[in-house]
Amino acid sequence: MTSTAPASADQVANCARPGANLAAAVNAVRRDLSAGGHVGLDEAETVARQLVRLAQHYGNHPFSPLEDVRRLLDVNRASFSRLLDLFGLVPELRHAVETGPAGKYWQNTLLPLEQRGVFDSVLARKPVFPYSVGLYPGPSCMFRCHFCVRVTGARYDSSELESGNKMFESVIDEIPADNPYAMYFSGGLEPLTNPGLGALSSRAAVRGLRPTMYTNSFALTERTLATQSGVWDLYAVRTSLYGLNDEEYEETTGKRASFRRVRANLLRFQQLRSERENPIRVGFSYIVLPGRVHRLLDLADFIAELNEAAPDRPVDFLNVREDYSGRADGRLSEAERTELQEGLFAFEERVSRRAPTLNVDYGYALHSLKTGADAELLRIRPRTMRPSVHPQVSVQVDLLGDVYLYREAGFPSLNGADRYIAGRVGPGTSLAEVVERFVNDDLRISPHAGDEFFMDGFDQVVTARLNQLEADVAAGWEDVRGFLR
Ligand code: SF4
């Protein structure tokens, strides 16, 4: 079949959003398909209606197995298969899924991984070099955030630094050059507590890699930048902000007067990157906590202040997330939803006035909320965790060379986390070999209660997708598994 001309109106492209004009969308799809001769006149209306329902479903619930959706539409396998073919003929329907309330799942994670064939490798149990490699170089951290899983007092001995940094160099050298964003520095603990961070970053840059460093920026001082000039070779510095004044910082990190230091570091960093005409990108992660929605306005003002320190180099990006995880069923109350929505609109308005070039990413849940829909909540539990995990997708390597299979497991002495170590990189053992052994030997880790907390949001999305794909394959839908690729 050939693709129809994109004559369908905007209504189709927006049909997965709340309040969409579904009748208009169905009409447009019906016209497109009939004009292309893909459906008979007698069935056009029904087929168009089913296609719009498919777009609506996957634009809101991206992790549904195909069989579930087939039953929902109440069609037999042959009709469903034809529907999937017809869906591919109307580009606006795909667009509706990708930009629907759950569109961030598709755009940020699922489709990029599909396009590199990463899920195919996991499904085929094929060992390939991980798509994403986190290096966790920090031997310690100066903060003690109340939500951090880190074990108080646990740290790596400084005697590990030399061999650890050599090991990190070898991992950097292994990363395929055709995936420049594969590697990042994070933790575990705070990357800037490793005095070799700058040298590692320069080594990565020489190889053409573009690593981001996730940091609390407490140690991002002018002195650190002088002694570790390689920090300037990073692609981006992403600072986790734990508040917007000293009191909030102390409440969260346990450290007094820490906001004023982070703020001073960042103001100076802004000036220096402007003076040096350095291309490094600057951005933030900020978590909205219950009751603190109004602080978003202060966040916009803080970013505007940093922009004023270097008017030619405004802050590049901001990732905003919410953490209302304490809710019993994970759902927001009506009052909280309204408060968050209003807070987000006020924030957007302030950003458009005071920091108009800022690129704001709201993540899965807040993006849904902004569109007025309820986010699909991913609740991976031990029974839905995958014993074979997904080292072809991502791994994390700590200072000892231990290769962790989940992003929140790489902390020293964390109870139970050592079960999620796939192996150790070291003299004579490369990261590729650790992954190869884990996959080829078909090693499996039986999840225990509480193990789901070793996963971050990315791990959860990947797990949900892989479970969905396996269900599709098992149900005989291998050719079209996952709905979109
Ligand atoms: S969350 Fe980050 S900054 Fe806070 S204590 Fe843990 S490692 Fe340190």
Image: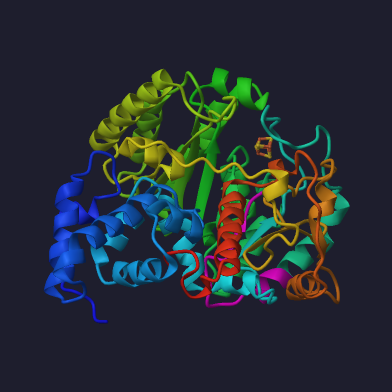
Range drawn in magenta: 170-189
Write down the quadrant of residue 220 in the picture: top right
> Can you give x and y, in whole percent of width and height, for residue 20 in the image?
22, 43
**In the rendered image, the vertical position of residue 209 relative to residue 266, given as above or below:** below
**In front of the other: 212 or 468:** 468
**In the rendered image, the vertical position of residue 10 relative to residue 295, given as above or below:** below
Give the residue displayed 42% in from the left and 51% down from the top. 72
Left or right of 76? Residue 168 is right
Find out whether residue 187 is within the magenta segment. Answer: yes
Looking at the figure, which quarter contains the C terminus?
A: bottom left
Looking at the figure, which quarter contains the N terminus?
A: bottom left
Find out whether residue 211 is within the magenta segment. Answer: no
Q: Main secondary structure of the magenta part?
A: loop
Report the number of numbered marks.
0
**In the rendered image, the vertical position of residue 109 relative to residue 366, given as above or below:** below
Q: Is residue 83 visible?
A: yes
Give the residue displayed 46% in from the left and 21% down from the top. 292
Q: Which quadrant of the picture is home to ligand 1?
A: top right
> Can you give x and y, in whole percent of width and height, for residue 375 in the image?
44, 39
> Can you give x and y, in whole percent of width and height, for residue 416 in the image?
84, 44
Q: Is residue 6 visible?
A: no
Write down the quadrant of residue 304 in the picture: top left
